[in-house]
Amino acid sequence: MNAAQLAQLIALAAIWGSSFMFMRIAVPQLGPSWLLEIRLVAASLILLLISRALRRPLNVRKHWRHYLTLGALNTTLPFWAFAYAAQTLPASMLAILNSTAPLWGFLIGFLWRGKPITPRAVAGLVLGMAGVASLVGLGGLAVQPEALWAVVLTASAAICYGIASSYAEYAEKVETYANAHGSLWAATLLVLPFMPFAPVPEVWPPGAVAAALVLGVLCTGVAYLLYFHLIATVGAPSALTVGYLIPLWGVLWGWLFLDEAVGLHTLLGAGLVLSGTMLVTNFRPSTLVRALRRSRES
């Protein structure tokens, strides 16, 4: 990475890390379902406008089943689970639990596809689960049924990401931008039939609506574009390192703007989860250190 690419990576981590803060702002007034649909529609429209400008077709007739599957697993279910959990859990905890997705992805790959498991990966899974346990136990959530249910939902969202990654590895090959665009429209349509049954907010506070729109436009639409741009310029392995920075930004935004306390359980849980994820994915912190050095040299 050069300096500009490293700045883009950090910006992407900051944007995705802020999504949990915007969920916490919007969901108390709008509810999970309306927050989800506003987010999906805003993101889909942004990608539609850009795809028209770039002339990137979706080939819906050929790939519609793939888009529906990916939209359900990678967008609809996890986005709704995070929106529901955001009614209870702080943004920092949502960001940390979100980073367990690679752990679940590895476990699902082992159970579903029979991928080999190594002692290093086992150690990573143990560390990751210990991190979740410390967040729940030391944070006092184990004695709060509603909060514990929110943790289960958040973990389910991360599991959905793991299933989606395993599915995408063996699914039909579709251009990455079309994957993002098509799956977002599929998710939007999947949620639509349920909206008549969702409680309509009595009021639509401008701040909550603005947070939902920022969540869709910036944290979903623009973030997807920036992510795929990084994949194209620095490669997928380097672009995926953004996942190790998102929890740091999630905790920071929650502390700065939502007055969330950063306690021992937050730091310990984040450290264990990220350490476990690094072991499972064979990531080494030296990768980012080398990128920093190269960015300075450039």
Image (cartoon, rainbow, N blue to C red):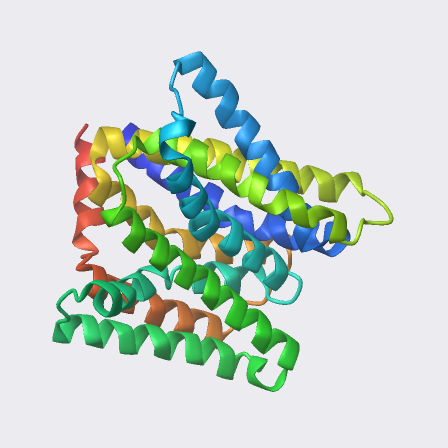
Horizontal arrangement in the rendering, residue 290 relative to residue 33 (left or right) = left
> Closest to the observer: 64 or 236?
64
Horizontal arrangement in the rendering, residue 194 relative to residue 228 (left or right) = right
The N terminus lies in quadrant: top left
**What is the quadrant of residue 272 in the picture?**
bottom left
**What is the quadrant of residue 31 in the picture?**
bottom right
Horizontal arrangement in the rendering, residue 196 relative to residue 268 (left or right) = right
- In the rendered view, tell whether residue 11 sits above or below residue 252: above
- In the rendered view, tell whether residue 23 sits above or below residue 179: below
> Closest to the observer: 72 or 19?
72
Residue at 40 percent of width and 63 percent of height: 159
Q: Residue furthest bottom?
A: 143
Percent from the top left, x then y, of residue 117?
15, 71
Asked if residue 235 shows in the view, the reply is yes
Asked if residue 215 shows in the view, the reply is no
The C terminus lies in quadrant: top left
Residue at 75 percent of width and 47 percent of height: 196
Total residue callouts: 0
Percent from the top left, x then y, of residue 30?
74, 50
Residue at 21 percent of width and 45 percent of height: 237
Percent from the top left, x then y, of residue 33?
67, 51
Horizontal arrangement in the rendering, residue 294 relative to residue 46 (left or right) = left
> Closest to the observer: 15 or 178?
178
> Closest to the observer: 113 or 283?
113
- In the rendered view, tell whether residue 163 sits above or below residue 273: above
Residue at 61 percent of width and 74 percent of height: 147
Q: Residue furthest right?
A: 202
Percent from the top left, x then y, of residue 98?
44, 59
